[in-house]
Amino acid sequence: MQSLWRRLVCPLLVYGVKIIALLLAVSIIAFALVCLSPVDPVQQYILGLGTAISPEQRAEIEAYWGVDEPPVERYVHWLGELLQGNWGESALYRRPVLDVIGERFANSLALMLCAWVLCGVIGFVLGCIMGVYQGRWPDRLLKKISYLISSIPTFWLGLVLLLVFAVWLKWFPTGFSAPIGVTQDSVTLGQRLYHLALPAVTLSLMSFANIALHTRQKLIDVLNSEYVLFARARGEGRWTVLRRHGLRNILLPALTLQFASFAELFGGSVLAENVFSYPGLGSAAASAGLNADVPLLLGITLISALFVCVGNTIANLLYGVIDPQIREVAA
């Protein structure tokens, strides 16, 4: 019982406290940046109405939103409502913030998970190939490709893939998460994956190079170690050495980068979703920022921070499964 508490419950409590403290810090910083922003959310809301209002009506709107209060009081009031489950109403979509986030987050989660799996698998496999064939033509070719793709902006890469595979070849749709004219309930899984393929590939190409290059270097270090040289002297082949000695030693660093790429994937999804007109959380964040939709922007900021924190926490918990030495040290 004490071992279970020490190995499972205590780490979860520690991670929970850390996540709460981090979310509190993120909320303070995000709210402060919104207050310092030159964009007037009340003016943006009035422009969205499309009608002129009197100064008295504007004052009523400011009083209703609490804009006329000091920033500290506004933050305390907003945080209190947030803890009660009231995240406010989106001025852009005229709907509760949680409803907008819930609807968009499902699309973004599917996109980021597909891209996350693709970049991890592609990066790890290519890294192993480069490490095994160090200095030979597969290593040189794949290394140049990795450097090239990692230096290309996501939006430019997305536009090129959209132009080639959607406009010229017509293999994929030009955007959206479902066919035009089809209701959300009538969309099949195949149609969703068909519309998801090109944005997911674009997003995965943004992150796989780091994993591939890092895996390559770690594998080279392992292959140059003394115990691997001894295994080769006993007659073990290249792929046998990789399977017996290399994978366990390079899997943990690759997994670290894989889970650390959550933040990078979310940032890239903002650009990818806008290029492909994909209705996800990233495109909603861009629209909220451009239209000064403060409640929605703050809500998306907290959800994205929570998403990254949970990903890193899962990675830390999985370390002990992959490498028992870490579990023994933590115990």
Image (tube, rainbow, N blue to C red):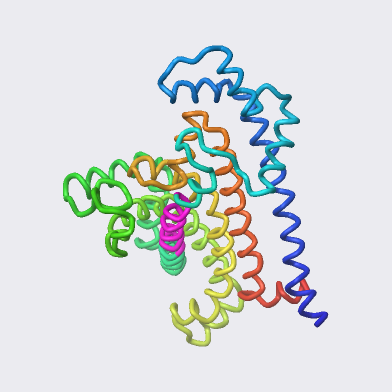
The magenta segment is 104-120
Front residue of 280 and 200: 280
Q: Position of residue 164 (x, y in %)?
A: 22, 46
Extreme-bottom residue of the structure = 234
Percent position (x, y) of residue 315?
61, 64
Q: Is residue 119 magenta?
A: yes
Which corner quadrant holds the C terminus?
bottom right
Comparing 222 with 271, the one in front is 271
Q: Quadrant of the N terminus?
A: bottom right
Task: Please determine whether, in this image, residue 40 is positioned above or below residue 82.
Answer: above
Drawn side of residue 287 relative to residue 180, left or right: right
Which residue is depicted at the point 76% across and 79% down?
A: 4
Which image quadrant is residue 60 in? top right
**Residue found farthest to the left:** 169
The secondary structure that most of the magenta stretch takes on is helix
Q: Residue at x 29, y 63 (%)?
A: 188
Residue 176 relative to residue 73: left or right? left
Asked whether the viewer can see residue 230, the reply is yes
Residue 39 visible (yes or no): no
From the top left corner, tell me how far across and down residue 86 is, in percent.
62, 45
Dividing the picture into quadrants, the one containing residue 24 is top right
Q: Nearer the viewer, residue 107 or 211?
A: 107
For the point 44% across and 52% down, the residue is 108
Query: Residue 102: where, in percent of width, then height?
Result: 50, 52
Q: What residue is at 55 percent from the left and 25 percent from the top?
A: 41
Magenta span has 76? no
Q: Is residue 71 left or right of residue 292?
A: right
